[in-house]
Amino acid sequence: MTKQNKMSKRKLSNMNFVLAAIAILTDILMVLGILNITRYSNFSKSIFVLINVVILVILLVLNGLIAYNAYAMKKSVLYVTIGVLVIAFLSGGALTYITTRVNKNIDKIINTGTTSEKVEVSFVVYSENGNFAINDINDLEGKTFGILSNTEEQVGYILPKKELEAKKINVTYHEYDDYNSMLMGLFGGEIDAAALPSNYVAMFEVNDGYSEYLENTKSILTFDKNITVTTESGSDKDITTEPFTVLIIGTDEQRSDALMLASFNPISMQVTLTSIARDSYVPIACYAGKSEDKITHARVRSRQCTIDTVEAMMDIDIDFYFESNFAGVVEMVDALGGIIITNPYEFVGQRSDARGKMTVWVPAGTNRLNGEQALAYARERHLYANGDFQRQANQQQVIQAILTEAMKLTDVNKALKVLDAAGDNVSTNFT
């Protein structure tokens, strides 16, 4: 063997070593990809088996070529091996990256146990003439303080008491069944201060006659805490064969600004959407004595409170919930590239991040709306003669448009962006 041939063989040997190392990495990436998609095998056993077979065949061919190349030491075999290896490596990398990103968002979306949720509480005082006798939390010493009466309620009962105890401030507690009664007690002088959600103004300013009183309130302390929230597991129904219900909740500043009950029939492949007016005055399941209040306020207490309230009101069992905040609607619609909406009237609506700021133009007619426009359309009610009833219909149209666009997705990057948006803003107890 000539010196040149020896050098050529040595180069091929070194190349085989590199290729073998890359092949091992490719094997690992492919196996990780298979493991990542295992959780979805119940969707279609046949498709899952087919994917596994295809990946295993690719790995067998690849590793066979690596072994043969190491034996044959031929450049022609080497080039074929490199080509197959590059394709397999890129495919394995893409498979692992996509499935890892999908699973990360799915894990963020699915909520089937306990989770941490940040809440904000304000200590609020009232003065009819604007001359506040209480300006600081230390001024609460010896005063009468309003809290919720439900001892299981972390936000309205436990957190305010712990905050006052931590600051060693002694007060006389006056318990109320709900926030509305507490606010009335504050306005009427029954209590000197009240523990309310930090968004109490937004909660009650829509009530007739409340605005002028709310203008004479102020928060002397606002604090936030992470609390542990337990969500009941979803139904164990076989949703491919049994009808099931889903409560769709759209939240804004802790309130359920949109409520829809979706009834699914998997046999006929039909869905019925029933909207629930957010200002419906109903018994709230988690209030002491189940006193009545606007159903939108149930979400301020907890998501489960909203679910239990709707179950009692509708006399049904809710199998699952699906919740999204306003940011989720905006981001998902933008990730989809907009949605097609038919709107009879041109108007300027609110931005999602600026309450009361009317800066979003929504055109009349059938148009592709971006996220902010779609949300403004879903929130608008004053423009329409039917008011809140038309808003409910608009919200249903937005949901249908989102699902229509989602079903047409063929771009992997766009689909991943939609999942990213959902992962940060959506919660459900579907498995």
Image (cartoon, helix red, strand yellow):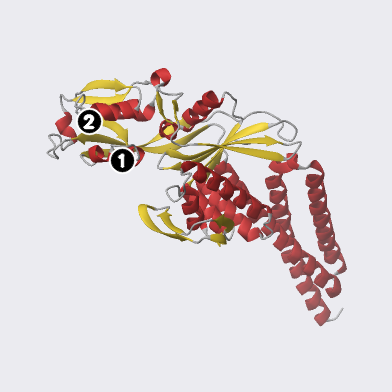
Quarter containing the C terminus: top right
State whether residue 335 is above or below residue 111.
below
Dot label at residue 168: none
Disc 2 designates what residue?
Answer: 187
Residue at image position (42%, 55%) is 349
Quarter containing the N terminus: bottom right
State the residue in front, 404 or 83: 404
Mark 2–mark 1 Cα distance, whole angstroms, equals: 14 Å
Residue at image position (37%, 21%) is 150
Residue 267 quadrant: top right
Residue at image position (12%, 34%) is 133
- Label 1, secondary structure: give it: helix
Q: Which amino acid does label 2 sit on?
A: Phe
Percent of width and height locating residue 287: 40, 23
Sequence order check, earlier mark of 2 and 1: 2
Percent of width and height locating residue 329: 52, 50
Residue 17 quadrant: bottom right
State whether residue 128 is above or below residue 29.
above
Q: Is residue 2 left or right of residue 349?
A: right
| Residue 166 in view, yes or no | no
State the residue in front, 91 or 77: 91
State the residue in front, 299 or 54: 299
Q: Residue furthest front?
A: 385
Q: What residue type is labelled 1?
A: Val
